Image (spheres, grey):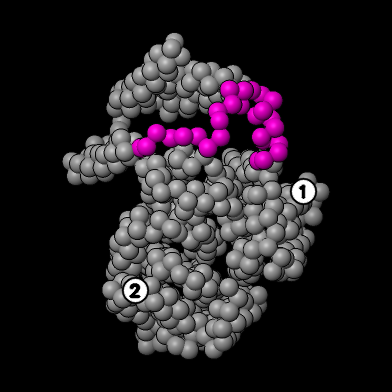
Amino acid sequence: MKALILLSSLGVIALLAEIFSFKKLIYPIVLLGLVLAFILNMFDWDTNQLYFKMMQTDNYAIAFTSLIIVISFLWFIMAEGFFKEESNQSDHFALVLFALVGAVIMVSYTNMAMLFLGIEILSIPMYILAGSNKSDVLSNEAAFKYLIMGAFATGFLLFGITLIYGATGSFDLTEIATVVSTNTAISSIFYVGVLLMLIGMSFKVSAAPFHFWAPDVYQGAPTVITAFMATIVKTAAFAAFLKLFHTTFSSLGETWMHIVWVMAALTLLVGNITAAIQTSTKRMLAYSSVAHAGYMLLALLANNSFSNSAILFYATAYSIASIATFCIVSIVANAKGSDVVDSFNGLAKSNPLLAFVMTIALLSLAGIPPTAGFFAKYYIFTSAFTAGNAGLVLIAIIASLVGVYYYFRIIIAMFFKENTNNQPLEVTINHKLLLIVIAVAIILLGLFPESIISLL
Amino acid sequence: MIITYMFYLLSFLAIMFGLMVVLSKNPVHSVLYLVLTFFAIAGHYVLLNAQFLAAVHIIVYAGAIMVLFLYIIMMLNLNKEAEPHKSLWIKASAAVAAGSLLVVLVASIKGTVAITPSNEFNPNIGLIENLGQTLFKDYLLPFEVSSVLLLAAMVGAVMLAKKSIK
């Protein structure tokens, strides 16, 4: 709640900066504000307060809110170039901060009305920011596609909420859960409601077969916005998804588990195999982000006490590694004019730091020890295995072998291929610091995974 | 009794006009049928004794949004049949997908046990006073939070519309 108020006010301050002309100061103010929001948020740990029966700051919500704030802090440092453009500076800041407000609501809602508002507050700035590169046709296409498909998915979500309201007479998660667990004969429209909400949420986390928007939108949007969508939006959407299906619909497991099983298998296979045949690294990372949604669906499906911490750790490991890869891809693509895999040829010689951090981040995404990604996958697989989904774990392991193949294509290009295009790379000091911090964090999380796993 | 007949009449009109929105070739006709659909739904609000919601519904949807729709269609000049031809596969898969959804919905409504509302229906629930009580007591936080949504949408619209100054 404190984080919510602080982030909303930061957004308004960013807008005021345009009027009172202190634009130069917004960037430091926002970074400071994020640090403050993180600290205030951590004060609520173990308090478990319920606000207006609409939002709850239990440890689950606080952990995910903190994760979102930390990732957005890293993201702001990565995206400094995005905020250099004079004319739209404060609009960009305000939209990103409002999107964060939506993300915070999505991880702490206890009412369907708040879930819907959170998703919309997160999505609408994203639709606009995806098209923020107005002169680029691809960016326009991305924004348009995202808006149309997103609105359609929201329609499914709302229809689902309506049917559930019709069957239970309540928007409140705990009340719905009580009705479901005490009533033996629930109205059959309730089940349709659950399915429609499942469709809406799967769209937001880009799980197959609702992933078709993701590659085009991720590729067309400016790279920094793609990084935002692949990390913060995905984390918030998964936290909301998990909260809904683990607290409210948990006792109806047999209704949705078969569907999620098929969706997880499809997402893993489609995401990984399609990523392997891409030439553009940005598009490859888009498909890989679809594939990572598949791994997280495994923990959702497990539906046991372990899945919350497994998803929290997976989201952490995946997000920080993604920030690093997107940062490096945007640096390389800016210098060479193209983001195909061949642009990375010989990067290890021309810029060892970038190549080193990229290698660590890609190893983490592929799930190779001693990086954070290994333990992330390990916990997810353990959680799925204890729930008795051994078949799905097998599919996930095969899929992650395909993943190793395409992540290593970039690593091989960086280390073993000759550079033909000797364009010097411009890396700012902030980006260098950010990349070093992320590389250290990935290794540290890989060495001490309990630090996060034991939180929930 | 007359209310039941009114309900069926309005539902029939809403569904028929809804179908006409989808089926009519001319986009301007589609929009006009949409206006009629909204009026039929506003009639349902009146039947539930929610006159304020009915008025707001007509003002916002039939008034503001429809005018915007018509204006955009006029600017786009969609009178010619410019729609690209869809392949048979896409049509077939769309029909199968939508048909499956229809089957699921119809089956679920058929299997519905008679819904007993958890609390007795209050005929005055739709009046403006009760609406205000609900909005500013139970749903105060969502009401406040939606201001962020509106502000974000407004900022975004301005950002997309304005020229970038070099």
| For residue A51, above or below residue A167 | below
The N terminus of chain A appears in which quarter of the rendering? Answer: bottom right
Instruction: Choose between B16 and B31: the one closer to the eye.
Output: B16
* Disc number placed over residue A16 in the picture, else none: 1
Which residue sits at x=35%, y=54%?
Answer: A255
Residue reaching furthest to the left: B88
Indicate the quadrant where residue A219 lies: bottom left
Quick one: label 2, few (<14), some, or many (20+) residues within 10 Å?
A: few
Q: Secondary structure at mark 2?
A: loop
x then y, percent, for residue A134 = 52, 48
Residue position marked by numbered label 2 in the rendering: A388
Q: As drawn, is A219 to the left or to the right of A272? A: right
Q: As drawn, is A33 to the left or to the right of A265? A: right
Q: Secondary structure at mark 1?
A: helix
Which residue sits at x=45%, y=48%?
Answer: A183
Indicate the quadrant where residue A7 lies: bottom right
